[in-house]
Every structure is written in structure tokens, then in C-alpha cells.
DNA sequence: GACTGGCACTCGTTACAGTCGAGTGCCAGC
DNA sequence: GCTGGCACTCGACTGTAACGAGTGCCAGTC
């Protein structure tokens, strides 16, 4: 593993040039474009070592070198600084997010902004319900046997679900039910509600019990277990930049993966605001994304995470710039949501 | 324009073969695969006429013929019957849609189903708010100067928006506001609410007036003007089927168009349940979609339309099958929503 | 011992020529 | 009006050759 400083500089130069030109880079071009202070022959020797160690490879014998996933990894970990954003970019972020009127709007603006700034596919998770708490529960009678249950979370998320009651109940009972569930659940984290919901049923007076039982089932089922997590996507057209060279010629697996919300959630939903995760090519556990890289982080007030966001692009991407942008956007969104 | 029956039969055969094989079809292959009862030479003469009239064309001099947009148009209008769905498909539709728990779920299932059955990109518009009526309005106090306004439409759609009040108001006033807006607006179509909202302000008692004014602004602005329309997408990965031959080599414009909700809405949002619209290639007003075809219709109970749905694919698509599927899915969804 | 210039070698790219064959248009004949 | 026959076109494919970017290796220099 004896990689001296110059070899690392060579690797850095190769990554930078390849990302910029999208073409295998040779020893001669390298010494011309960078001040390495040595001859092409020396660079060739260094390249041979780098190749042996698995950081770069040749697409074919008489071609220049291309970074491997491992090479990008080394570059990201040790050879690059996070690029500070340009003032123009900072302004773009602020301008874009100011004026959002509700949560949906914030999420949509964010994902579009991220796609535009990074020129990649952007993914933003809605604030996770599990980490939100209940602000209010509303029960709206639709008919004597049907209620619409609406839950408003402190993050601004609103979820609704139809409840089919086992028997007709009078309006006064709906009022009672509403009061009871609100007294019990408002303010508590959704991840902590199951025992509370259970208690609600046990404590309820006999004539409300059937309705409360049904209601609690729906509460548990829908609001906590089922589609509690949602995501927004933007910038899929960016996948076609750089011709078909990226993604080894086929967008299919990428597009398929992007449509699977579960997959995407797993990909970006676990990060914390303080860390930025970079997954490069092969490091990805999802087979369909073996030709892609993902940069993700969490957002939220302070260091608590409400959800994740990130971008997906070719392994040949501008990591320093992308990482900087993802972080910046996450921070702004976190602050914005903290104000609500 | 003297196209006799045989020439039309030839055109039909060309369209069918080309759709199936994706390769230019020649006179010899045509007589082999279809019982036209004439020789290749005769077919060639017919082809020459069809080409002159602009229904087919040759990619290059020594190749077979390919239908033009105009050819597909004639095929759709006069040469094809809507294919009845297979029992398996009918069952798939029913199985897929049964068990949907709320509107979001219905829409998501529908769009995925449509993408799967047609193997194209599917687009489903959420039930249009403009054509829905108000079932209930809820006001939830967030703080003394902030309310969360939640509107529930008869289609099951729920919209929310934060209201910043000009001055703090007591909880009793919120109750009054809630009662007033509900009395006035419940049951009316959203497209008819603006005068009613106006009246609400004018009729309100002095001490409620400031709050009511703000509230009415939000009501008009958000629920009626702004993002009143939403769509769901699925099956973008299907764009990559058939290699890059479809869409003249670049998915970019298509993907860009798909991300523009406004564009998509215009495309599918105007149809009525009784008619099915087919836009072929050039007929499309959106430049980005000149290489694609769109099959769309409306859905809703009876012949009133709640929204549109459709699929987008290459001009080289199985029109009879696609049309049948789009119609069938629209009918099922319409019925499903009518039951709510 | 590390770097360098030089050189032979590899191999993908491009250009060009030639062959093949699917498919056509046209025409004389039935 | 249809058909068989025939000459023609032109893209697809194959083979050959020249080109050149880029390499690995080695002997020479500091």
C-alpha cells in the first residue's frame, strides 16, 4: 500500500480529468494539464502501481486510465475537500425555498432545487412520521357508519384514512371519540403511540368500545405501519446526460429502482444531518444501482433527523461539489422546517 | 385518395407487423404472413400508392416500409377494432384495485396497474378539485395566530394549508369560523365557491372579520387556484424497452416532459369518460413528445369526469390493446370512486 | 535509487473496398 | 388488373490497411 504523495496526486488528477472529460486519461495529457513536475514516463510507472492496487484500470490495452470504484472511494475519503458553494448557489437555495406555503410545497421545491443544482436525480423523503409527533386528530363523519380520520403531525404532514364502523353511531359519540383520542395522543411521538392506542380501547366506556376498537385498528395500521414514508423525485432527465456512457448503456435498472419507494427509502432514509453518506458503484447493496453513486444525508432541526435526502448519479460524478450541495440544501430545509 | 379495400388491408398488415417486429416490413414477408391473396408485386404497387399518400415511408431506399404518424392515424380511426380484454387482464384489474384503503392508495394502484398492463408509462390525475365538492372544512389551531386549514372533498381528496392570522384569536372564535365556513361551503362545487367565500367575508360579524378575510384569501388561493391538480406517474422504466429505436434515440425530452406536471395535466386532463383520445406523434402539441403517442380518457361515475388518465409510449405501440386497457381501467376506477 | 528519454508494441479507430441480399420499381405478358 | 421476371439500389457486413494514442520496458543520467 505504499502510495506516496505523488501517486495520490496522480490519482486525484486522473479522477478530476476523467470527471471533467469523460474520457480515459493518458500519462501525457496528465502532465500537460497538471503541474506534477515529472515526466510522462514517471507518471506511467505510478499508474502501473495504482492499477495494481486496484484504484484505476484500462478499458482496453492501448487506452488511458479510468478510476475504479475503489479509486473514487480513496478520492472522496482522502483526496478531496468539500467545495464551498458559490454565492450564486447560496442565493439560489434561499430564493427557491422562500415562499413555500406548505409541506408539500417545501418538499417539491427542495427536490427540484437539488436536481437543478447537482444536475443529477434528486430524492427527498417527506418528514418521517415515526419521528414526528401528533399535533391533532380530526374525525369527520361521512355517514353514520363512516368516518374520515385525519392526522396532522407537527412537521405539517397530514394523513387521512377512511374508517368503516361496525355499527352506526350518533354524532355526539364522534365528538367523544375525537376528544378521547386527542387527549391521549396529541403531543406523543408516533413511534410511541401503539401502547397508548391500546390503552384507549381498554379504557373506553362500553358503548364506545366497538367504534374505538375499529378506530384504533386503523390508527395503528395506517398511520404507523403502512405508507408512513413517502418520497419525492426530480431530475430523472439528468440521467441521460453524458450519453449512454454512464450506467453502462442501460437506464432501465436505474429507472426501475427509482420507482420503488421502498428501495429509495432504504437508500436515503437512514442518514443523520451531521453525516453525509457516499455510496460508490459496487458499494451499493441494490443490484440495480451498481453502476451509480448516491450521496445522501439527513435533514432536520439541529442534529435530529426528520428524514433523508440525496442525489443519485453516475459513479463519474463531481463528488466534492455534489456533497457540498446536498449538505447545504439539507441544512436550509432543516432550518426551514424548524420554524414552522 | 382512392384507397380501395386491399390497400387498406395492406396498411393494416404493415402496421401490425411493424408493431410486432419493430422492423421495416417488405412486400414478400407481408404476403407470407397475411392472407392477402395477391402477389408481392401487387403489394408493391399498393405500397407505392400508400407511400405517395403519406401513410408509410421507407427509412432508406432498399428497406421495407414503416408506417408514418398519418398511417397510424388511419389505422386507429378505420382499420382496427378495440381488442376485448382477456379474462386474465380483467381479473388483474379487479384484484389490483380491490383493497385500496384511501384515495392515495387508489391512485397509486391504478397508475401501477396501468403501467403494468400496457407496458408503457402511465399517468393518472388525482380527482380534480375543481369538479369535486366540499365535504368538510376543518380548522385546527396551531398557535393563537396560526391555523391549519384542512379541506376534505367528496372524492376523498384532502388538502391542507397553514393560515397565518393577522392577530391572535381565542379558541371560541375558531369554533365560530369553522361553523360558518362549513355552513356556507359544504356541498358546493369547488369551482363555484369564490362568490360564496366572498359572501362569507361580507356577512361576518366585525370581530371575526380580519380572521375571516385572511382565511378566505387562503381558501381562494390555495384550494382553488394553486396546485389544485396533481398527477401520479409509473412505468418510466418501460421507456427503455425496444432499445433506443423508439423515441429516435433520446429519452431526454420525454423524461423532461413527464416531470412537468402542468404539461402532463394538459395532456390527459381534458378527456371525458365516454371518449378515448389518441394523440399520435406529430399530432402532439408538446414538442418534447413529437416522437411519442398518448392514449387518454377521463374517469368518473357515469359520464361525469373527475379526472384523466392515460399512457404514453412510442408511436409504434399496440393501439387496439392499449386503448382497450385504458378504457377498462378508467371504467373500474370510476366505479370504485363512485362507491366511496 | 529515482527519474527520464527513447523505442517497440498493442489495439481501438477510421477509412476504404468488396460482397451480399433484402427490397424495390418497372415492364412485358397473361 | 394482376403477375413473374429482372435490373437496380443501398444498407449491413467483412476484410484489410494505415493511423495514432497510449503503454511497458530499458538503458542512461543525476
Image (tube, coloured by chain):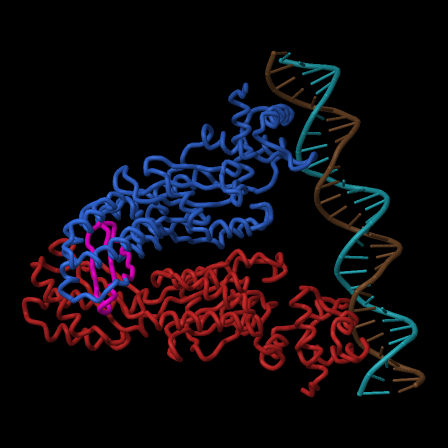
Chain colours: A blue, B red, C brown, D cyan
Q: Nearer the viewer, residue A213 or A50?
A: A213
**Percent x, y for residue B290?**
55, 68
Can you name the residue that lies furthest to the front here? A206
Q: Quadrant of residue A17?
A: top right
**Percent x, y for residue A95?**
31, 52
Q: Quadrant of residue A331?
A: top left
Q: On the picture, is A340 further left or further right than A59?
A: left
Does the image show residue A99? no
Q: Nearer the viewer, residue B194 or B331?
A: B331
Residue at the spot x=43%, y=61% of the render? B109
Please tell me whether residue A159 belongs to the stretch shown in magenta.
yes
Image quarter of the C terminus of chain B? bottom left
Q: On the picture, is B328 further left or further right than A333?
A: right
Q: Nearer the viewer, residue B46 or B291?
A: B46
Residue A139 drawn above or below residue A196: below
Q: On the picture, is A102 further left or further right than B117?
A: left
Residue A47 drawn above or below residue A199: above
State which region is magenta.
A134-163
Residue B80 drawn above or below residue A309: below
Image quarter of the N terminus of chain B? bottom right
Does the image show residue B312? yes
**Percent x, y for residue B191?**
28, 75
**Percent x, y for residue A259?**
46, 53
Q: Nearer the viewer, residue A16 or B119?
A: B119
Q: Quadrant of residue C6?
A: top right
Residue at the spot x=54%, y=18% of the render? A2
Amino acid at each position: 500500500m505504499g502510495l506516496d504523495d505523488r501517486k495520490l496526486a496522480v490519482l486525484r488528477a486522473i479522477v478530476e480529468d476523467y470527471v471533467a472529460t469523460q474520457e480515459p486519461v493518458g500519462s501525457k495529457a496528465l502532465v500537460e494539464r497538471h503541474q506534477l513536475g515529472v515526466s510522462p514516463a514517471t507518471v506511467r510507472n505510478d499508474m502501473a502501481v495504482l492499477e495494481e492496487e486496484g484504484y484505476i484500470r484500462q478499458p482496453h490495452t492501448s487506452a488511458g486510465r479510468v478510476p475504479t470504484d475503489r479509486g473514487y472511494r480513496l478520492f472522496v475519503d482522502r483526496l478531496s475537500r468539500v467545495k464551498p458553494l458559490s454565492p450564486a448557489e447560496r442565493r439560489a437555495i434561499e430564493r427557491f425555498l422562500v415562499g413555500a406555503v406548505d409541506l408539500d410545497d417545501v418538499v417539491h421545491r427542495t427536490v427540484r432545487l437539488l436536481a437543478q443544482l447537482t444536475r443529477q436525480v434528486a430524492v427527498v423523503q417527506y418528514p418521517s412520521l415515526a419521528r414526528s409527533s401528533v399535533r391533532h386528530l380530526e374525525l369527520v363523519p361521512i355517514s353514520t357508519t363512516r368516518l374520515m380520520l385525519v392526522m396532522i403531525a407537527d412537521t405539517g404532514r397530514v394523513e387521512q384514512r377512511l374508517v368503516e364502523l361496525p355499527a352506526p353511531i350518533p354524532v355526539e359519540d364522534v365528538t367523544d371519540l375525537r376528544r378521547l383520542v386527542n387527549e391521549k395522543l396529541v403531543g406523543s411521538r408516533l413511534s410511541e403511540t401503539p401502547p397508548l392506542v391500546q390503552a384507549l380501547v381498554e379504557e373506553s366506556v362500553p358503548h364506545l368500545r366497538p367504534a374505538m376498537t375499529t378506530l384504533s385498528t386503523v390508527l395503528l395500521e395506517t398511520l404507523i405501519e403502512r405508507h408512513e414514508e413517502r418520497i419525492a423525485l426530480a431530475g430523472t432527465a439528468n440521467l441521460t446526460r453524458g450519453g449512454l456512457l454512464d450506467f453502462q448503456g442501460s437506464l432501465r435498472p436505474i429507472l426501475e429502482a427509482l420507482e420503488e419507494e421502498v428501495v429509495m427509502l432504504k437508500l436515503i432514509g437512514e442518514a443523520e444531518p451531521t453525516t453525509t453518506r457516499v455510496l460508490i458503484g459496487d458499494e451499493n447493496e441494490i443490484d440495480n444501482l451498481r453502476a451509480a453513486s448516491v450521496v445522501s444525508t439527513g435533514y432536520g432541526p439541529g442534529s435530529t433527523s426528520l428524514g433523508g435526502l440525496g442525489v443519485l448519479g453516475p459513479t463519474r460524478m463531481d463528488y466534492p461539489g455534489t456533497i457540498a450541495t446536498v449538505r447545504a440544501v439539507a441544512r436550509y430545509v432543516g432550518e426551514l422546517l424548524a420554524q414552522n
